[in-house]
Amino acid sequence: MASKRDYYEVLGLSREASDTEIKKAYRRLAREHHPDANPGDPGAEDRFKELTEAYEVLSSAQARRAYDTYGHQVPRGSGQGGTPGGDPFGGFQDIFETFFGDRFGDRFGESGFGSFFGGTSARAPSRGGDAEVEVEVTLQEAATETEREVKVQIVRECSVCSGAGGTETRQCETCGGAGAVRTVRQSLLGQMVSTQACPTCSGRGRIIIVECENCRGSGRVAEIVTRRIQVPAGIEDGMSIRIVGGGHAGERGAPAGDLYVKIKVKEDPELMRDGDDLIHRMRINFVEAALGTEVEAPTLEGSRPVRLEPGTQPGTTHTLRGEGMPRLRRRGRGDLKVVVDVMVPSRLSSEQRELLRRFEEISGEETYNNGGGESFFDRLRSVFR
Ligand SMILES: [Zn+2]
Ligand SMILES: [Zn+2]
């Protein structure tokens, strides 16, 4: 290969150029030298490739550090010939982002893009994983804004070695501490440059001499942390509260994942939830139903007296407005529906049986005539409207 030009020279920049200057210079020159913009100029393609290679290296902090240290002669680790799972098309992702902005990424999706270009770049340390924890609250707690403490096991950066993995380390000589190595290879599309995590130090940039006992060299430790979370009033069973950055630590300074607190609302023995409404099944016996009675209906805050008229039918519903659940992140509350269930005796003494027979003898159809009111099913339907 002919002697290569210095990357800074290719982009017309000084060695102190900022990231923005590098990007700007590349954009301007790439537009100027793009083969499509120079039809019939055989040199354009080479100039464009040279520019792209220079930009690819200088726009990556790690690759730039390695280049500043070693120039074009980035040393190779022993026996390294094409890292499996590496990125054969290297910095194309960056370059497409430069041209197309976010639209391109959106269209292909992160994974689609990665598979199209043969795996995501090893340069970018990955974001930490999300953590999930479940919290059980009572219906009463779900009805008010509550604060809960949750214990969650997450992976954090080791505090003893600050994520280095060792209490004593030295700079990796393969990558000069940059954590990345750059390779150039021929492919169907021409010369391709790729930057990969250094195989000697796995991208850390340092070699462990004395392994950290706290994390056994991994740089990360699983810890149980306690977090206080606010559970908003009106939360429903199965909903999750997301705490940004509350998940597992990312690799080498990458952002942490999120914590999802999944809410389990315990079933209440008295109050059944139907969205923002609550339903209570009020059991009265057939004599109370016939003669009328006053009952105490349980509410979220205690109880409320409810007057049941003589001749109350099964399925009769009393709606207590505003006694239901608070509406999540909205004003107001749902209703509490008190649905009457009439108990019919199942074990009668001979005396009771006799009294009921006598009652039956003196009763006619008019005894049961409730004025052609709603049917049992109409009443039930009104509960679950
Ligand atoms: Zn450690
Ligand atoms: Zn290394």
Image: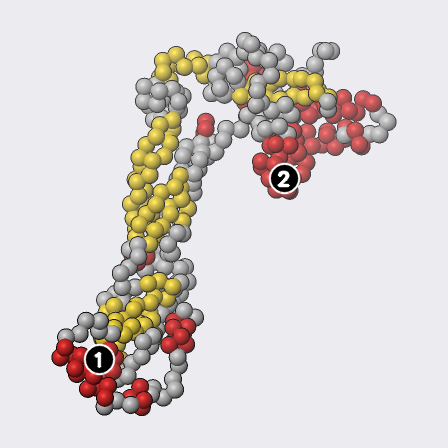
Q: How many marks?
A: 2
Question: Which type of secondary structure does the marked residue at label 1 adopt?
Answer: helix
Of tags 1 and 2, the one toward the viewer is 1
Q: Which image quadrant: the C terminus?
A: bottom left
Question: Which type of secondary structure does the marked residue at label 2 adopt?
Answer: helix
- Return the x and y of residue 73 as percentages of the image width and height: 61, 11
Residue 93 relative to residue 356: left or right? right
- Return the x and y of residue 318 as percentages of the image width and height: 32, 76
Q: Which amino acid does the dot numbered 1 rest on?
A: Val
Q: Is mark 2 within 8 Å of ligand 2?
A: no
Q: How is the image coloured?
A: secondary structure
Residue drawn at the location 41% of the way across and 46% of the way down: 242
372 relative to 273, above or below? below
29 relative to 201, above or below? below
Q: Is mark 1 within 8 Å of ligand 1?
A: no
Question: Which callout, 1 or 2, points at the residue further toward the start of the chain?
Answer: 2
Residue drawn at the location 22% of the way across and 80% of the way down: 287
Q: Which amino acid does the dot numbered 2 rest on?
A: Phe
Hey, which quadrant is residue 195 in on the image? top right
Q: Residues within 10 Å of mark 2 (few under 14, many from 20)?
A: few
57 relative to 266, above or below? above
State the residue in front, 175 or 111: 111
Residue drawn at the location 32% of the way across and 22% of the way down: 214
- Return the x and y of residue 203 as percentages of the image width and height: 50, 21
Q: Residue furthest right?
A: 40
- Return the x and y of residue 106 as percentages of the image width and height: 61, 42
Residue 97 relative to residue 381: left or right? right
Circle 1 is placed at which residue position? Answer: 287
Hey, which quadrant is residue 313 in on the image? bottom left
Label placed on residue 108:
2
Residue drawn at the location 23% of the way across and 66% of the way down: 302
Q: Residues within 10 Å of mark 1 (few under 14, many from 20)?
A: some
